[in-house]
Image: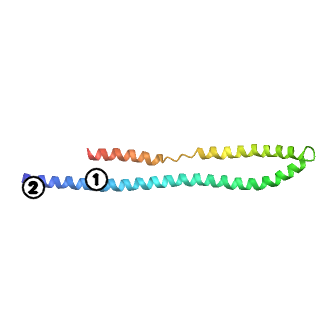
Amino acid sequence: MAQHQMAKEEQSLGDLLAELAGETGTLVRQEVALAQAEITHKATKAGKNIGYLAVGGAVAYAAMLSVTAAVILLLAQFIPAWASALVVGLAIGGAAYFVIKSALAELKKTDPVPHETIETIKEDVKWIKKEVT
């Protein structure tokens, strides 16, 4: 009778370990899905900012070509044409610097690390250790 009860306990322990293995596999799959979702969200946000940067740069470039020509022609009436082009070119270069610097600062604020997933994985490891001991 003691052997029958011992075999039943071993079977229960085996069942528990199988259940734990199944739950752990499900948990790992869920964590991977969460990490993918979090990273995708952050990448989408960064991609959006990069897209805005590119579109803004193209529109600014087209506008600056027209404005540059007009300002150079206006200044050329008062100073030599080469000096007029130089002054306008330096002014536009300065403006471009500040626009690009601002966009890059926003991109640097984007944190690609999936903090939420890392925290839940830590919690999962604690849970698994608790279940195994």
Sequence-first disc among 2 and 1: 2
- Residue type for callout 2: His
Identify which residue is drawn at 36% across, 47% down: 124
In the image, residue 130 sits, relative to residue 12, either above or below, namely above
Q: List x then y, in percent, for residue 81.
A: 88, 47
Identify which residue is drawn at 64% across, 55% down: 51
Image quadrant containing the N terminus: bottom left
Q: Residues within 10 Å of mark 1 (few under 14, many from 20)?
A: some
Q: List x then y, in percent, for residue 117.
A: 44, 49
| Residue under label 2 | 4
Identify which residue is drawn at 51% across, 55% down: 40
Q: List x then y, in percent, for residue 73.
A: 89, 50
- Residue type for callout 1: Leu
| Residue under label 1 | 20
In the image, residue 102 sits, relative to residue 45, either above or below, namely above
Secondary structure at badge 1 equals: helix
**9 on left or right of 82:** left
**45 on left or right of 77:** left
Secondary structure at badge 2 equals: helix
Most distant residue in the right direction: 77
In front of the other: 9 or 129 = 129
In front of the other: 6 or 68 = 68
Identify which residue is drawn at 14% across, 55% down: 8
